[in-house]
Image: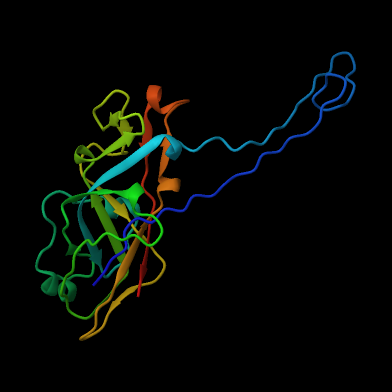
């Protein structure tokens, strides 16, 4: 089973320019006691323009039968997760079943277009999984800038991963992961890096970055 992890979509923006007359940005004359407001729309260079690599350490991927919210996905992420998948699928719909344990660093920025990263496989009883979570380890993750600077959770400036320990990210599934007898179900995870990463201030070099992962999933 092949998985595609972390594709990236970059969307360009707009720039609006208008002419000014008589030294006024609005072109209108002002009376005593009046001022003017000028609105501008620009497309700031995204944070990704200065980044060479976004290395995320993926511990494992868990699934469960019952739907979950973000708080539930981030609960109980320490340890190795459930390994006896067959028993848990039939016994408890709220149990997280580990379906992949890569324990590996992935450069998310390198996974563009049709590039894929294999996470792993699992054999489970036939079931319909309605929730998925991606567990990362910020302590083993980092961001490399194009000038060679490496930012981590403990560097100065740093990368804020919104969690000091392992972090469970709820995957936004657009359909259930339905496992059929004798068949292979492929789950594609799309790490939306453009939506996940942002500047903490005016510049990366001075203020660092924040990563609040947005991950979407599709089963087929």
Tell me which residue sits at (37%, 43%) in the image: 212
Spot the residue most to the top. 32
Q: Nearer the viewer, residue 138 or 169?
A: 138
Total numbered circles: 0
Residue 16 placement (x, y as % from top left) = 71, 38
Residue 110 shown left or right of residue 57 in the figure: right
Spot the residue most to the front. 147
Q: Nearer the viewer, residue 7 or 80?
A: 7
Residue 156 shown left or right of residue 197 in the figure: left
Residue 205 placement (x, y as % from top left) = 38, 24
Query: What colouring does the structure picture have?
Result: rainbow
Q: Quadrant of the N terminus?
A: bottom left
Q: Measured along the vertical axis of the image, is residue 199 above or below residue 192?
A: above
Tell me which residue sits at (22%, 86%) in the image: 181
Q: Quadrant of residue 177?
A: bottom left
Q: Nearer the viewer, residue 33 or 204?
A: 204
Tell me which residue sits at (12%, 62%) in the image: 82
Residue 101 shown left or right of residue 170 in the figure: left
Q: Quadrant of the C terminus?
A: bottom left
Q: Quadrant of residue 60?
A: bottom left
Q: Quadrant of residue 4?
A: bottom left
Residue 174 placement (x, y as % from top left) = 42, 67
Tell me which residue sits at (16%, 59%) in the image: 101
């Amino acid at each position: 089973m092949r998985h595609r992890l972390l594709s990236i979509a970059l969307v360009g923006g707009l720039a609006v320019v208008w002419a000014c007359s008589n030294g006024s940005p609005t072109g209108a004359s002002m009376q005593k006691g009046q001022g003017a407001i000028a609105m501008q729309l620009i497309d700031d260079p995204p944070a990704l323009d200065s980044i060479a690599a976004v290395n995320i350490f993926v511990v494992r991927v868990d699934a469960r039968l019952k739907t979950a919210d973000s708080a539930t996905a981030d609960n109980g992420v320490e340890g190795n997760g459930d390994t006896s998948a067959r028993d848990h699928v039939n016994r408890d719909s709220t149990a997280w079943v580990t379906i992949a344990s890569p324990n590996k660093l992935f450069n998310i920025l390198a996974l563009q277009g049709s590039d894929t990263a294999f996470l792993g496989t699992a054999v489970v009883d036939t079931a319909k999984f309605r929730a998925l979570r991606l567990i990362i380890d910020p302590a083993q993750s980092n961001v490399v800038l194009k000038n060679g600077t490496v930012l981590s959770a403990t560097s100065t400036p740093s990368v804020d991963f919104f969690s000091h320990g392992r972090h469970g990210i709820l995957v936004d599934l657009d359909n259930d992961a339905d496992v059929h007898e004798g068949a292979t179900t492929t789950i594609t995870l799309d790490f939306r890096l453009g939506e996940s990463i942002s500047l903490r201030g005016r510049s990366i070099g001075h203020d660092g970055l924040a990563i609040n992962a947005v991950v979407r999933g599709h089963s087929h």
